[in-house]
């Protein structure tokens, strides 16, 4: 008999965003006359930068000619893209070598797949509220999970507790869902904790391109000692609108050495390379040529223009919440605004109220953990017109 992984029984029946999609579909079927404005899932709405599209077009033409056709590429990514990413890191003072960079189809995949190289005996420390992938992928492995609570008092930026011992620590900054971002000093405390406890920090930097303050690090590797205790995930989904194009990268420093239970040392960089070459065939050449262009001067300028558009949307959301006297977090270094539910509503009750009374979709905070209850996430990724209309409706209902 083939037995299944019983740990799947510890998961919720459906993924958060699938549940939201079903509720919205049911409402739209019952009320087709209502224009529903979606500000829930963190999907972009602006098209790819023109220079990126041009680069991908040239790559398509290459694939149509015998002399420039490409088949299987290197699983860790083409050198031209890895070199461009290394140069990008140097622009904000992070010294990363090309062979420490692994190109993938996105940060979500790598955040889940990285668990392959760690023992299931590790204790996992996860923030709450939290991006569901961190929790679910470790539940699937049956690992012991402990939580650190994000609260209004700590700005939804929990710090280490020396009485708590963890082997693997998940950090996300700027944070999804709260939009909060760690300062350099705060990250230095986390690095010190990890080094002291021989722990590994899994650092999700998917939203680093939204950082607008030099005091907020765009990479954990600007912190001294981080290359001995951290792995960083990043994505072009939000930086360059690659949500449908799929491209990201993970940095595994060569200084990361850890032991098995019987004391044998392993290089995590080599382990991740072995994992990727076994289970992953790489990102398509056409996509990688587009990604390479993102990191050019022209590409960065065009992508930052799109980011500025979303940041202006976030400002519109925050101004509406200010008008209504509703407390919120995020929105400055992040496309997410994390708001308190008005009228003391629970987050799913507020989701239903906002959908049925206002015709706006957001994300209930309870979907991100128990500390997310009575909070709600709005995203700035909609169009300018829809963002303005949604917040005009919001102000009319809650002012």
Image (tube, rainbow, N blue to C red):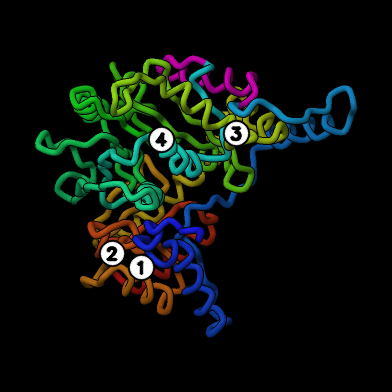
Q: Whole-percent x and y of residue 229? A: 31, 24
Mark 1 to mark 2 CA distance (whole Å)? 6 Å
What residue is shown at x 63% (from left), y 33% (from top)?
282
> Which is closer to the viewer, label 4 or label 1?
4
What mark, if any, has residue 324 been given in the picture?
2
Residue placed under numbered mark 3 in the picture: 302
Along the polypeptide, which appears first: circle 2 or circle 4? 4
Q: Whole-percent x and y of residue 226? A: 31, 21
Taking the image as shown, residue 33 lies to the left or right of residue 353, namely right
**Residue 336: in sight, yes or no?**
no
Along the polypeptide, which appears first: circle 4 or circle 1? 4
Circle 4 SS class: loop
Residue 296's image quarter?
top right
Mark 3 to mark 2 CA distance (whole Å)? 34 Å
Mark 2 to mark 4 CA distance (whole Å)? 32 Å
What residue is shown at x 73% (from left), y 30% (from top)?
72
Vertical relation: 339 (above or below) 68: below
Pointers 4 and 1 in contact (C-beta within 8 Å): no
Along the polypeptide, which appears first: circle 1 or circle 2? 2
Along the polypeptide, which appears first: circle 3 or circle 2? 3
Circle 2 SS class: helix
- Count of numbered circles in the view: 4
| Direction left: furthest residue | 163
Residue placed under numbered mark 4 in the picture: 205
Residue placed under numbered mark 1 in the picture: 395
> Which is closer to the viewer, label 1 or label 3?
3
Q: Whole-percent x and y of residue 348? A: 33, 71
Along the polypeptide, which appears first: circle 3 or circle 4? 4
Taking the image as shown, residue 146 lies to the left or right of residue 311, namely left
């Amino acid at each position: 008999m083939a037995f299944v992984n019983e740990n799947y029984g510890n998961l919720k029946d459906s993924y958060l965003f699938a549940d939201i999609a079903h509720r919205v579909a049911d409402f739209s079927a019952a009320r087709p006359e209502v224009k529903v404005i979606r500000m829930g899932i963190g999907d972009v709405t602006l098209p790819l930068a023109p220079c990126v599209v041009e680069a991908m077009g040239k790559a398509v033409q290459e694939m149509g000619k015998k002399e420039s056709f490409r088949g299987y590429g290197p699983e860790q990514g083409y050198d031209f893209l890895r070199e461009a990413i290394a140069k990008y890191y140097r622009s904000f003072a992070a010294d990363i070598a090309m062979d420490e960079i692994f190109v993938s189809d996105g940060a979500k995949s790598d955040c889940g797949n990285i668990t392959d190289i760690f023992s299931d005996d590790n204790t996992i420390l996860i923030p709450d509220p939290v991006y569901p992938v961190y929790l679910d992928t470790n539940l699937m492995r049956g690992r012991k999970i402990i939580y650190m609570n994000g609260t209004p008092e700590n700005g939804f930026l929990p710090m280490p507790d020396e009485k708590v011992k963890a082997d693997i620590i998940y950090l996300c900054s700027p944070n999804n869902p709260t939009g909060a971002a760690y300062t350099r000093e705060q990250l230095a405390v986390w690095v010190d904790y990890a080094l002291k406890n021989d722990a590994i920090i899994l650092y999700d930097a998917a939203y680093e391109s939204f950082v607008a303050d030099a005091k907020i690090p765009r990479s954990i590797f600007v912190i001294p000692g981080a290359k001995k205790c951290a792995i960083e995930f990043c994505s072009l989904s939000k930086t360059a609108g690659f949500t449908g194009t799929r491209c990201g990268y993970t940095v595994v420093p060569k200084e990361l050495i850890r032991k098995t239970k019987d004391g044998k040392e392993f290089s995590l960089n080599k382990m991740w390379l072995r994992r990727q070459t076994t289970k992953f065939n790489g990102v398509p050449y056409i996509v990688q040529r587009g990604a390479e262009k993102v990191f050019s001067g022209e590409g960065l300028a065009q992508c930052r223009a799109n980011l500025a558009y979303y940041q202006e949307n976030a400002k519109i959301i925050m101004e509406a919440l200010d008008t209504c006297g509703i407390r919120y977090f995020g929105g400055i270094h992040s496309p997410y605004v994390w708001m308190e539910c008005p009228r003391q509503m629970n987050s799913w009750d507020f989701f239903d109220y906002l959908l049925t009374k206002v015709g706006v979709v957001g994300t209930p905070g309870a979907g991100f953990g128990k500390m997310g209850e009575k909070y709600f996430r709005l995203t700035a990724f909609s169009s300018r017109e829809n963002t303005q209309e949604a917040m005009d409706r919001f102000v009319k209902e809650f002012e």
